[in-house]
Image: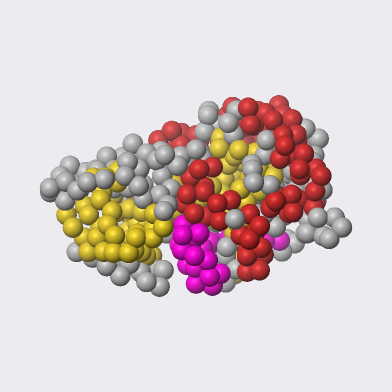
């Protein structure tokens, strides 16, 4: 396959190049919302999936492959050696493109805890990229989290989720804030959840030391996402069930899972799917700079991280510091190691996060009228091609 690494990533407003003929991808197992169609076909006309084939369509034989929707990552801090929290615009675009090479056709850029003025400044930069269509919005992970469950966040910069501070970041994002992670048990937490819900921003419960009862209260106030369930929260207890049980049992909550083999034991992933169901799980990367780049020393916000054998940990203290995961690897692990049905993996990687973003009318499935965002996989679930908005990002070169 040929990787088109040099091109600037396509935007939401992308149009096909002049003379770019419609395409019919024919012969693959196509995963649709209604199930998998054997030896199916997907018709691409311009930036969209079409319901009927134009006369001049080019037929591309993809027999022996899988065709699945482009992946949607709602929690991602960077990649390709670049940080979404501190990098230049070119750095951010490099990180976005790195993940596109691994099948992520829609990405929400996540920040980490920092000074409020700095985060507001970053929100301004990232909102411009969102307006251009390079990213699907901004996720603020911190600073409104618990010092008891801070993970790879600077404790000195943490603060309670005062609604005025939360509003400052939302306003700085100029309508492009998609999600804010909160420890909702902290002072101001519930009022901030209500504020976010009123502004159409996802309130996510995470990096929290909440009890079961406090978590239920936050869900009732409007929280709808569990930030990387199991990680950075109290473990499940038989007398003190904590947030995990409350988040798993409530049908209003979508649970994020980091399926890299480091953050979760396979039994924990199975537990989440069993209790939440496949329609309430969103696989995320929680990726940092080293994703798609390699081992070494990196900065995650103000903290130094050592990446060794693909696992990122803080130099001081050793806490896991995000991941080096890409969503093609999460997909392959889900269906080959976790033994999930392919349709459930597609839901967790595409449809469910697209619905969370309110974008399922445009992305998240291979249906006519939606953007031509798709991933081509071989029979072993290794990535062979990526298309975004009708243009090949990774060209499978199948003829």
- Whether 294 is drawn above or below 78: the answer is below
Instruction: Where is residue 294? Give x, y as percent.
Output: 51, 65
Residue 261: percent from left, percent from top: 60, 68
Residue at coordinates 67% horizontally, 28% vertically from top-left? Answer: 195
Residue 5 visible in the snapshot? no
Give coordinates of residue 340: x percent, y percent.
Answer: 52, 66
In the displayed structure, does residue 64 sit left or right of residue 262? left
The quadrant in which the N terminus is found is bottom left
**Magenta residues (range):** 319-346
Queried whether the magenta region covers residue 343, the answer comes back as yes
Give the quarter of the figure containing the C terminus.
bottom left
Measuring from the top left, give residue 315's x and y in whole percent. 69, 62
Above or below residue 227? Residue 185 is above
- What residue is drawn where x is 52% and y is 47%? 353
286 is within the stretch colored magenta: no
Residue 269 in view of the camera: yes
Residue at the image point whose x is 28% and y is 64% from the top: 39
Q: Residue furthest left?
A: 55
Of residue 304 and residue 358, the one placed in the foreground of this image is: 358
- Which residue is at 42% across, 52% downward? 33
Residue furthest front as drawn: 34
């Amino acid at each position: 396959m040929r990787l088109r690494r040099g091109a600037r990533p396509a935007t939401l407003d992308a149009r096909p190049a002049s003379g770019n003929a419609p395409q019919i991808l024919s012969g693959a197992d196509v995963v649709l919302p209604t199930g998998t169609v054997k030896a199916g076909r997907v018709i691409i006309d311009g930036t969209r999936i079409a319901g009927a084939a134009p006369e001049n369509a080019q037929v591309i034989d993809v027999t022996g492959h899988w065709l699945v929707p482009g992946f949607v990552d709602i929690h991602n801090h960077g990649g390709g050696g670049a940080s979404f929290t501190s990098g230049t615009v070119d750095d951010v675009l490099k990180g976005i493109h790195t993940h596109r090479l691994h099948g992520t056709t829609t990405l929400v850029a996540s920040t980490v805890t920092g000074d409020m003025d700095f985060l507001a400044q970053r929100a301004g930069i990232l909102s411009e990229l969102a307006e251009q269509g390079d990213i699907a919005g901004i996720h603020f992970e911190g600073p409104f989290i618990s010092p008891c469950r801070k993970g790879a966040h600077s404790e000195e910069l943490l603060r309670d989720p005062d609604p005025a501070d939360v509003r400052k970041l939302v306003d700085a994002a100029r309508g492009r804030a998609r999600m804010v992670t909160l420890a909702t048990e902290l002072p101001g937490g519930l009022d901030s959840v209500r504020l976010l819900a009123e502004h159409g921003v996802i309130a996510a419960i995470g990096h929290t030391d909440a009890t079961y009862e406090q978590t239920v209260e936050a869900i009732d106030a409007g929280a709808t996402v569990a930030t990387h369930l199991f990680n950075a929260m109290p473990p499940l207890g038989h007398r003190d069930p904590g947030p995990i049980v409350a988040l798993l049992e409530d049908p209003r909550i979508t649970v994020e899972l980091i399926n890299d083999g480091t953050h979760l034991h396979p039994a924990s992933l199975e537990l989440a799917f069993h209790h939440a169901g496949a329609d309430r799980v969103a696989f995320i990367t929680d990726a940092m700079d080293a994703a798609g780049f390699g081992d070494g020393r990196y900065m995650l916000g103000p903290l130094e991280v050592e990446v060794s054998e693909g696992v990122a940990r803080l130099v001081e203290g050793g806490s896991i510091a995000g991941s080096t995961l890409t969503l093609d690897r999460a997909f392959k692990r889900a269906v080959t190691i976790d033994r999930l049905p392919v349709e459930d993996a597609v839901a967790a990687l595409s449809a469910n996060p697209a619905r969370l973003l309110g974008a399922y009318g445009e992305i998240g499935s291979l249906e006519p009228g939606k953007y031509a965002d798709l991933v081509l996989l071989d029979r072993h679930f290794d990535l062979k091609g990526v298309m975004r908005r009708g243009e090949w990002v990774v060209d499978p070169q199948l003829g």
